[in-house]
Structure formats: C-alpha cells, structure tokens
C-alpha cells in the first residue's frame, strides 16, 4: 500500500530513480581515478564491464558528480574509448 500512495504522490518518480548498480560503479570509477588511474583504463576494468552495458557506461559519463570530479577532458577521452568499442 505504501508503494501505491508513493506512486500517486509522484507518478513520474521512476524517471528520476537511480540505479544502485550504477551508483556503485560510479563510486568505483571515482575512487580508482583518484588513486591515479586514467579514466579510460578504469572504464575497461572487468568490474565496470561486467556490471554495466555500453549505453549504461556512456550514461555514467554524463552524471554530474563524475563530470565535476574528473573534468571534461577525461570524460571526452573516455567517450572516445567507448565509441571505438
């Protein structure tokens, strides 16, 4: 019943829901990049590849916290790597 009332309050909430798997991978990417690894290398890790599809990986690179932390240059390089796959 709680889900129904929650849905009735905000019927479009599913559009803004975050995927916990993507959240975990985002945290991993930020942590690995902070340790000095290039973003393109981190994206190629089996941890990322086994948990996210290529479209999900591309969406990961548009997350505000990722862009803010890593910067536009690193994001552009990682996007180029993903589009070559």
Image (cartoon, rainbow, N blue to C red):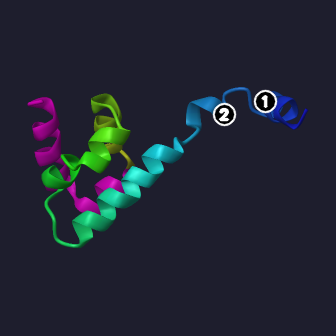
Q: Is residue 84 left or right of residue 9?
A: left
Q: What residue would you read off at disc 1?
A: 7
Q: Tell which residue pokes out farthest to the bottom in this image.
A: 35
**Distance of mark 2 from mark 1, alpha carbons?**
7 Å
Magenta residues, as a range? Answer: 64-85
Answer left or right for 45 relative to 77: right
The answer to whether residue 61 is seen in the rendering is no
Residue underneath mark 2 = 13
Main secondary structure type of the part rendered in magenta: helix
Q: Quadrant of the N terminus?
A: top right
* Vertical comparison of 31 with 13: above or below: below
Q: Earlier in the sequence, mark 2 or mark 1?
A: 1
Determine crowd level at label 1: few under 14, some 14-19, many 20+ residues with C-alpha closer than 10 A. few
Q: Position of residue 41 (x, y in %)?
A: 14, 53
Farthest residue to the right: give it: 1
Closer-to-camera residue (21/79): 21
Q: Are marks 2 and 1 in contact (CB under 8 Å)?
A: yes
Q: Is residue 66 left or right of residue 1?
A: left
Residue at 16% in and 65% down: 37
């Amino acid at each position: 019943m709680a889900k129904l009332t929650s849905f009735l309050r905000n019927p479009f909430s599913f559009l803004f829901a975050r995927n916990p798997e993507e959240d975990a991978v985002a945290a991993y990417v930020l942590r690995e990049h902070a340790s000095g690894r290039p973003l393109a290398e981190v994206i190629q890790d089996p941890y990322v590849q086994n948990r996210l599809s290529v479209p999900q990986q591309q969406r990961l690179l548009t997350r505000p916290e990722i862009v803010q932390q890593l910067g536009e240059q690193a994001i552009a390089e990682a996007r180029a790597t993903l589009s070559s796959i």
